[in-house]
Image: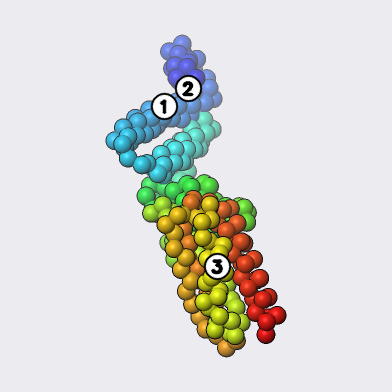
Amino acid sequence: MVVILLIGSHLLFENKISDNKWLTQVIKGLSTFLVPSILLSVSRFIVIALYNAQHANKAVRGNFVLGINRLTAVINAIFAIIAIMIALGINPIEFVTSLTIVAMAIAVLFRDYITNLISGLFIMFSEQLSVGDRIKIGDHKGRIVDITFANIIVQNEEDDIVMVPNNLVFTNPTVNLSAHRSNLFTVKFELPLYAATEIDKLEQEVQAVTLNHPNLAKDSDMILNVEEIGKDFVRYKIELHAVSSSNRLHKQLENELLRQILIFERTLIKSS
C-alpha cells in the first residue's frame, strides 16, 4: 500500500499536476514520509532477520526485537510530523530554529518523560530485563508483562497491574528474580518471643507441610532462618524451591505455610 502511494505521488509530478502549489506541498510531504518509512521497514525486517538467524540456537529474551519495533515507531512518528509540516508549507529546519527557546522549555517540562524514554531504550536493548521476568524494583514486585518508553508494566502478586517508571530501574535497587531461572521463594513471618524456645517443634510443623508437597521441588530442603530478634517477637524466614516461578503458586504455598504456623501459635497459646 505504501509503495502504491509513493508511485502515485511521483506520477502526479510527471503529469505536471504539481503546478498547483498546495498539491505540490502535499505530495512533497507524502514523499518525505513514505520514502523513509519504506527504508525503515526494510531495514527493520533485515536487522530482525539477521538477529534471529544469529541467535537461532540460543535462548533469545526478545528485548532486541521489542526495542527495534518501538524505535522504528518513534522514527516513523518523527518523519510523519516533518511530512505534515512540509505539506503545510513550513520549513522544518527554520521552524525548529525559531522555536529553540520554546523547545528548551518543552524539554524541561517533559524532562521526566524524556529520561524515561531514554531509560526505556536502554532496558529494551539490554539483556538484563525482559518481558516475562519476575523482578523487584524498590517496593514493587511481580512479573513484567510489557516494556514501554515510559514504564515497565508489572503484574504483582495480587494480579494488579503496576506501571513502574523506567527511571526507577537505574535509581533503585533492582532484582531480577528470573535471571537464573530460579524458582526460589521466601516466606517471612513473626512469632511471639516465647515461641523461640519451641523452634524445633516449629520446624517439624513446617516440614509436615513441605515434605513430599507436589508443588515443591523434590530436592528442595526447607531452611528456617531467624531474621531478627526484637523486644517481644522473633522474625523468621523460610526459603523453598517451587516447581515453577508462578506468582500464584508461590502465594498459594505461602498461604499453606502461614496457616500451619497460625495453628502452631494457637496450640502454644492453649498449652501455656
Q: Earlier in the sequence, mark 2 or mark 3?
A: 2
**Residue occupied by mark 3:** 206
Q: Nearer the viewer, residue 123 or 19?
A: 123
Looking at the rendered structure, the secondary structure element under dot 3 is: helix
Report the Cα–Cα distance between label 3 and label 1. 62 Å
Report the Cα–Cα distance between label 2 and label 3. 65 Å
Q: Position of residue 177 (x, y in %)?
A: 45, 57
Residue at screen point 52% across, 72% down:
203
Q: Give the amino acid at mark 1.
A: Ile
Labelled pair 1, 2 in contact (Cβ < 8 Å): yes
| Mark 2 crowdedness (10 Å alpha carbons): few <14, some 14-19, many ≥20 | few
Residue at screen point 41% across, 27% down:
38
Tell me if I can see residue 257 in this picture. yes
Task: Name the outermost residue toward the top.
Answer: 15
Residue at screen point 45% across, 27% down:
34
| Mark 1 crowdedness (10 Å alpha carbons): few <14, some 14-19, many ≥20 | some
Q: Give the amino acid at mark 2.
A: Val
Q: Earlier in the sequence, mark 1 or mark 2?
A: 2
Instruction: From the image, state whether disc 2 or disc 3 is nearer to you.
Output: 3
Looking at the rendered structure, the secondary structure element under dot 1 is: helix
**Residue occupied by mark 1:** 38
Decide: is 186 above or below 195: above
Task: Name the outermost residue toward the right.
Answer: 270
